Amino acid sequence: MFTDAASGTRPVGRDRRGFLKELGLGGIALASLLADQTASGAAADLSEPLAPRQPHFAPRARSVIFLFMVGGASQLETFDHKPLLKEYAGRLARDIFSKKDLEGLSPEKTYTHTRIVPPVFSFKRYGQSGAWVSEIFPNLTKVVDDIAFINSMHTDSALHFSGQILMHTGYARQGHPSLGSWVTYGLGTENRNMPGFVVMTDGRPSGGRALHQAGFLPGIHQATLADFKPGHPPVPHIEAPAFLSRGQQRAQLDLVRKLNRLHRGIYRTQPELDARIAAFETAFRMQMEAPEIFDIRSEPDSVKALYGDTDFGRKCLTARRMVESGVRFVEILDGAQGRRWDAHGNRGGLINNHRTNAARTDRGITALIMDLKSRGLLDETLVVWATEFGRTPMEEARKEESLGRGHHHYGFSMWMAGGGVKPGITHGATDELGMHAVKGRVSHHDLHATILHLLGLDHKQLTYRHNSRDFRLTDVYGNVVHDIIA
């Protein structure tokens, strides 16, 4: 039995979950905390579990904006120019590549009878750097001299589920913390009124919640999901309930905090309760600042026009507002619903697929880099554009007429900008047909080690003890790619 805070007199019967929802924190705290019952390890600092922490060495970046193109963007149609494919067009893949190459790509498909496909879009060099960029990114060509392209990525799986989890957690299986969770675990956040790790997505990716969970880290490091649906707040219950004053809400939260502390005193082997208590505090404080950060109507018309009136453009603008306010790690997943970058022949075809996807994202990404730079934020904000894998130099095995490429993890492209990265360079290369990364190879472990390094964190020192073993984001692998660091 609890006393109703609105009247101070009426006793009402409620279950624990219903009571917590009436705090106005239900959508935030229950989704971000109570759904995660698996946190373990050392108890969190209840006073400030996400307080800023000292890095291992002087950082180049203060925050990260991670742009993830779900489905596997083709390196051959974006940033890896391979004109020799035109000369080999139509030749059987089995006559050019080894049996091991073709059988190792995907257990779901065979490439024995497939033929080489030339790039379907034209490429040109842009900027003083002379970076090769496909025609489908006309806006991005304006900022190529701020970007470090990496054309030598490789990873361990050509399956969407495993590939997405690898790129986010470093492991091909579920249960490990996400990159954003490791970052907030190592550095905390600079804004106590906001979570340290926020994800904006347009649907559920193949990897599901495993992409953004805290795994065995304390639950406070799990991502807060923001969903931009017309007519709905990005985070449920982000505004304080009208029937409670600020003081009444604070009193209720203090009561819950007291009860949880008593419970923790009895069950000291359940450290996940610390994360619950801490996240209720964060959720309570979010109501003071988050609505304003998510509301882009206050931005000048010129800025809104720069980003464009699209769902993706608004997310990019919101990401800038979040890192500007001190949020440590922001991720935008594009095409999560239905893996929209998955360029198979039976999914609309390669040409229509990539032209449409690039048109949806090109303006917002370019605006983000230009806006950060104009505000002096690009130097301290690391922007990463990535995908789970690339696409094959040959067509996929298909019956339909529409052209498509298969999954390909031997060599693909991504890029970084700002945050201590060398501007205007292209690192690494695949072979002449875009099959294998052969020069300056960068694995997903190397990528993670480099991102942590730019944030001032040594990936070998950032560990967490779980089940009698010290775990880290990069497992026992990973080398910092110093060639791309300014």
Image: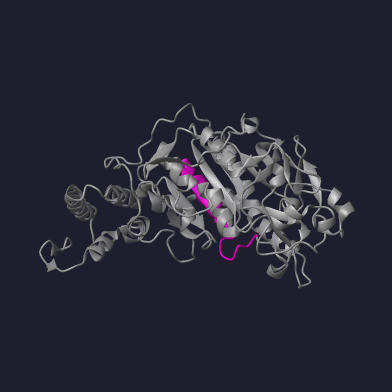
> Would you identify the image quadrant in which residue 341 lies?
bottom right
Q: Judge by depth and name the residue closer to the eye, 309 or 267.
A: 267
User: Relative to residue 207, is residue 370 depicted above or below?
Assistant: above
Q: Report whether 475 appears left or right of 186.
A: right
Q: Report whether 218 appears left or right of 199.
A: left
The structure residue drawn at horizontal position 71% and vertical position 57%, both measured from the top left corner, is 103
User: Relative to residue 118, is residue 421 depicted above or below?
Assistant: above
Image quadrant holding the N terminus, namely: bottom left
> Would you identify the image quadrant in which residue 403 lies?
bottom right
The structure residue drawn at horizontal position 49% and vertical position 65%, both measured from the top left corner, is 230
Q: Which residues are magenta?
A: 315-341
User: Relative to residue 183, is residue 347 depicted above or below?
Assistant: below
Q: Judge by depth and name the residue closer to the eye, 357 or 127.
A: 357
In the picture as drawn, the residue positioned furthest to the right comes out as: 87
Residue 358 in picture, x, y percent from top left: 68, 56
One can see residue 117 in this view: no
Residue 372 in picture, x, y percent from top left: 56, 40
In the picture as drawn, the residue positioned furthest to the left comes out as: 9
Residue 57 in picture, x, y percent from top left: 47, 26
Q: Report whether 345 appears left or right of 251.
A: right
Q: Report whether 390 appears left or right of 216.
A: right
User: Relative to residue 462, is residue 172 depicted above or below?
Assistant: below
Q: Judge by depth and name the residue closer to the eye, 101 or 452.
A: 101
| Residue 390 colored in magenta in the image | no
In the picture as drawn, the residue positioned furthest to the bottom comes out as: 400
One can see residue 261 in this view: yes
> Would you identify the image quadrant in which residue 328 lies?
top left
Residue 333 in picture, x, y percent from top left: 55, 55
Image quadrant holding the C terminus, namely: top right
